[in-house]
Amino acid sequence: MLVDSHCHLDFPDFSEERDAIVSRAREAGIGRMVTICTRVRKFDQIREIAETYDEVYCSVGTHPNNAAEEQDVTVEELIQLSRHPKVVAIGEAGLDYHYDYASPEIQAKSFRIQIAAARETGLPLVIHARSADDDIEAILREEMGKGGFPFILHCFSSGRRLAETGVALGGYISFSGILTFRNSQNIRDIAAIVSHDRLLVETDAPFLSPVPYRGKRNEPAFVAHTASALADVIGVDTQEIAKLTTDNFFRLFNKMKAPDQVVDKA
């Protein structure tokens, strides 16, 4: 069994064949998928998808690039929405200085609101970090001083220091198809030094397809290729990487039951 800890099944890229995409993931042995919310105001779409498929769970939150659109989102609203049984995470939150869709100040405010929701609910915070390592690190350290919260640095493409800080603060690091790219040796070097009990894999579908699908639309079934690349990086076989990343997944997203924890009511 493998898991896709981060995908976007609500995106238009999937609207015409979502059933087939989930079916292909199932056939590829992908036992769980977390479809990630990027706009709280569109959470109903995310929730409906998660309710439709047994294997699919979801988060609730505001992507930093959408922070200016959702300045009215409150901690209390996130907590309320997170009570749905299929919501297993908060976010994706964070900072993105590559684009200029929202000011750093607005992004940071949204980030801190979602941190507070993660702290209150105990659900992991899904963190997006792009071209903002120093500020991400500073906010994480400051907010951890107010009280701990679980988190994951998703689709890791930042520097080694942020990875080390994230793990030191109790976070997890998730690697996407970027790990398979020929010019991403620096990311493979970082993956090699992350504690094995903090490693996860994802697709970030429909983006960042791993080799051999690079340049095509990504989908959850392709996470197996990223997992294989991660296995090579840390020197284990594919069965071990599947068990390792799946165990880590259920430890982090602990609101959802692992398959062997599901009680057969028949």
Image: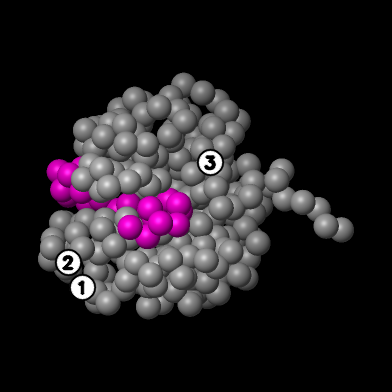
Q: Residues within 10 Å of mark 1 (few under 14, many from 20)?
A: some
Marked residue nearer the N-terminal end (1 or 3): 1
Q: Amino acid at mark 1?
A: Ala
Camera-nearest residue between 173 and 137: 137
Q: Which residues are magenta?
A: 116-139
Q: Which residue is mark 1?
A: 68
Q: Is residue 200 above or below residue 196?
A: below
Cα distance in 3D space between marks 1 and 3: 33 Å
Q: Amino acid at mark 3?
A: Arg
- Residue at figure coordinates x 24%, y 69% from the top left: 67
Marked residue nearer the N-terminal end (2 or 3): 2
Cα distance in 3D space between marks 1 and 2: 6 Å
Where is residue 10 drawn, in percent x and y? Answer: 46, 70
Left or right of 220, for residue 192: left
Where is residue 124 drawn, in percent x and y? Answer: 43, 51
Q: Is residue 262 above or below residue 78?
A: above
Q: Secondary structure at mark 3?
A: helix
Question: In which quadrant of the rendered image does the N terminus lie?
Answer: top right
